[in-house]
Image (tube, grey):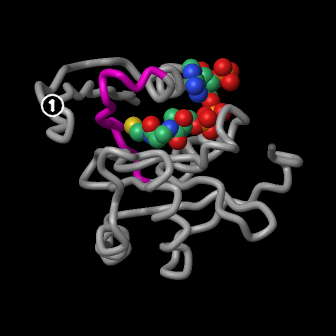
């Protein structure tokens, strides 16, 4: 359980965080966890922005986005299981919404597993709408992907 959300620090990801991000991935994304290489590749993209949520130097969650032309795409978002349902993903999403203000974007998009109701509820709370279905988008379990978007 998190002590106090006000102690939570949000900071840009650097290479020293990668092992912790992989641990979170292995915990929450059992079907297809991102590798260390995948995270390092992301850090080298000048259009990618990743943030971690930390408390007392322990990384509890992270979010990654791409900003391309006038659109933002949420690439990944995860919170350590023991710290879920305490508002951490919401704080990370708010950080992203704050970060992208300066880009004057028209749209944020993301894909989410059809079975992932927790994430769908979270995005809906922020005003995202389901706009399309991608058949078999998640090839690991032949699961459909919902595309959700928030327009400005
Ligand atoms: C989805 C996820 C990031 C949510 O993180 P979180 O820190 O628990 O989310 P928050 O505490 O900020 O929750 C905000 C809202 O999301 C929704 N929500 C979160 N977890 C939920 C759950 N288990 N069931 C239903 N709704 C849920 C609720 O609407 C919640 O608002 P409320 O607390 O007022 O009810 C987290 O469950 C997770 O890491 N899941 C595994 C990875 C994943 O699915 N990532 C998203 C990929 S698209």
Q: Which residue is painted at 54% across and 55% down in the image? A: 62
Q: Residue at the left extreme?
A: 135
Check the image and report above or below for 132 versus 78.
above
Q: Quadrant of residue 41?
A: bottom left
Q: Residue furthest right?
A: 3
Q: Position of residue 51 (x, y in %)?
A: 54, 61
Task: Check disc 1 and report its element: helix, strand or loop.
Answer: loop
Q: Horizontally, is 59 left or right of 127 in the view?
A: right
- Measured as percent of width and height from the top left, residue 48 is found at 36, 63
Q: Which residue is mark 1?
A: 142
Count of residue discs: 1
The quadrant of the picture occupied by the C terminus is: top left
Query: Which range of residues does the magenta coloring cover?
Result: 103-117
Q: Quarter of the image containing the N terminus?
A: top right
Residue at image point 12% right, 30% down: 136
At a point 50% along the width and 25% down the height, the residue shown is 118
Left or right, 59 with respect to 139, comes to right
The reply to whether the magenta stretch includes residue 138 is: no
Comparing 75 with 33, the one in front is: 33
Q: In terms of depth relative to the viewer, which is nearer, 30 or 40?
A: 30
How far from the left and from the top, in percent, is residue 108? 36, 38
User: Between 20 and 96, which is closer to the camera in this rendering?
Assistant: 20
- Label 1 crowding class (10 Å Cα cut-off): few <14, some 14-19, many 20+? few
Quadrant of ligand 1: it is top right
């Amino acid at each position: 359980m998190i002590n106090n959300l006000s102690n939570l620090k949000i900071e840009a990801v650097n290479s020293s965080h990668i092992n912790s991000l992989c641990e979170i991935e292995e915990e929450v994304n059992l079907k297809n966890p991102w590798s260390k290489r995948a995270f390092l590749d992301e850090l080298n993209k000048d259009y990618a922005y990743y943030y971690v949520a930390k408390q007392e130097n322990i990384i509890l969650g992270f979010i990654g986005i791409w900003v391309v032309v006038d659109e933002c795409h949420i690439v990944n978002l995860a919170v350590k299981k023991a710290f879920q349902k305490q508002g951490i993903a919401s704080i990370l999403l708010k950080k992203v919404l704050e970060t992208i203000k300066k880009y004057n974007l028209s749209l944020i998009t993301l894909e989410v597993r059809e079975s992932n109701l927790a994430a769908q509820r979270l995005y809906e709370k922020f005003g995202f709408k389901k706009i399309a279905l991608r058949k078999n988008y998640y090839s690991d379990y032949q699961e459909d992907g919902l595309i959700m978007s928030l327009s400005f």
